[in-house]
Amino acid sequence: MNPFQLSQPTLLDRIWLSIRYPYDLVKAPMDAFLSIPALSFLLIPTFSSYSTSLNLLFFYLTWSTLILSNSPLKVEIIGTLAIRLLFYILPSLGFLFFDSALPGLAVNIKKHGDQALPWSKENEARKGRWWKIALVSMGNVLLGVGLQAGIELLFTEVFHIRSALKVTTAIPMPWGIAKDLFRGLLLREALTYPLHRYALHSPQSSLHNLHASWQHSVSPPYALVANYDHPLPYVLHVFLPAYLPAVIFRFHLLTYYMYLVIVSLEETFAYSGYNALPNGFILGGIARRQERHLMGDGKGNYGCFGLMDLVIGTGLGDDVLDDIREEAELKQAKEKGKGKTRGCGPRGKR
């Protein structure tokens, strides 16, 4: 036996490599990107530093190597799966575990108390359903990723045109990223509203009963309910409004990853049912409107953020302007409190 001959990987080695591959594929460019100081990254066109330039160079080399050593479709789909897993599925499963392991603590930070737990004592029908809701929600996420892969294959292999998303070694500029994110989220809101209101909540629609008997059967919401629906309403109401803006504006893949992180975090926290959210002004307002939509039999709040409902007048309860007023009043109260604290402090010597 030749001692210098490399041994063939075992079955366990192959399984481990297949599990670790998506993590390694996303980790390297994400580490490089996150190592760039945010302020320096935004000020690159005007100000620069050696450390920022080196970080950018390292990120560019890592990203270029990733794109050149893998097929564009593989990078896009595995990166999408990793983001959905890290920013939606795992956090939502963590919320479910928290609700089940510490219900006494969870009920104190749930807006609707015990009623908002996945296996509420007040709602016996919920018992035995949470795992089905979790499986359907995760299945719909995989369905969306599969449709995304199918669309890319249709564009490139059948129609022989350029890919739906821009997958290149070039890195988009900060202003381009910000512009695409802004108009992408705005178009997502504009698409969600009519599809949600007229295709899913119109009595004449064939999808009305499916949507009502699936997603609207869970009220108030809890983790993973954001993507719990019959596959047809899910594709029309969740997947298409989120994916079409990226195709219409042809996002760079890195911009699409950032866009998908925002969408995933919104779905995770807005449907969690918790009072304490990372950003009460944005996520808190979105969560309140989604809860009122589900608990109000779908009579309003058809958009994602509430902007279209504000313009058309179909909002239930507080709207976006109310959230802004509340945030302004809260800041004023905090500033007054700080001023009083300073005023009560020891005076300096004259």
Image: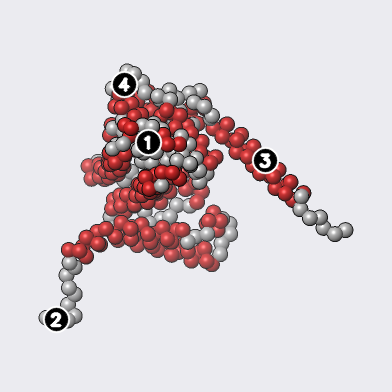
Mark 3 vs mark 4, CA separation in Å: 47 Å
Seen from the viewer's position, the closer of residues 209 and 341 is 341
Q: What residue is disc 1 on? A: 120
Say if mark 3 contacts mark 1, CB within 8 Å. Answer: no
Q: Is residue 226 visible?
A: no
Q: What residue is disc 3 on? A: 332
Q: In the rendered image, which quarter is residue 303 located in?
A: top left
Seen from the viewer's position, the closer of residues 3 and 319 is 319
Crowding at dot 3, Cα within 10 Å, few <14 / some 14-19 / many 20+, comes out as few
The numbered mark, 2 or 3, whose residue comes first in the sequence reads 2
- The amino acid type of the residue labelled 1 equals Ser
Residue shown at 33%/32% (left/top)? 124
The numbered mark, 1 or 4, whose residue comes first in the sequence reads 1
Q: Quadrant of the N terminus?
A: bottom left
Tell which tag, 2 or 1, sits nearer the viewer.
1
Mark 2 vs mark 3, CA separation in Å: 77 Å
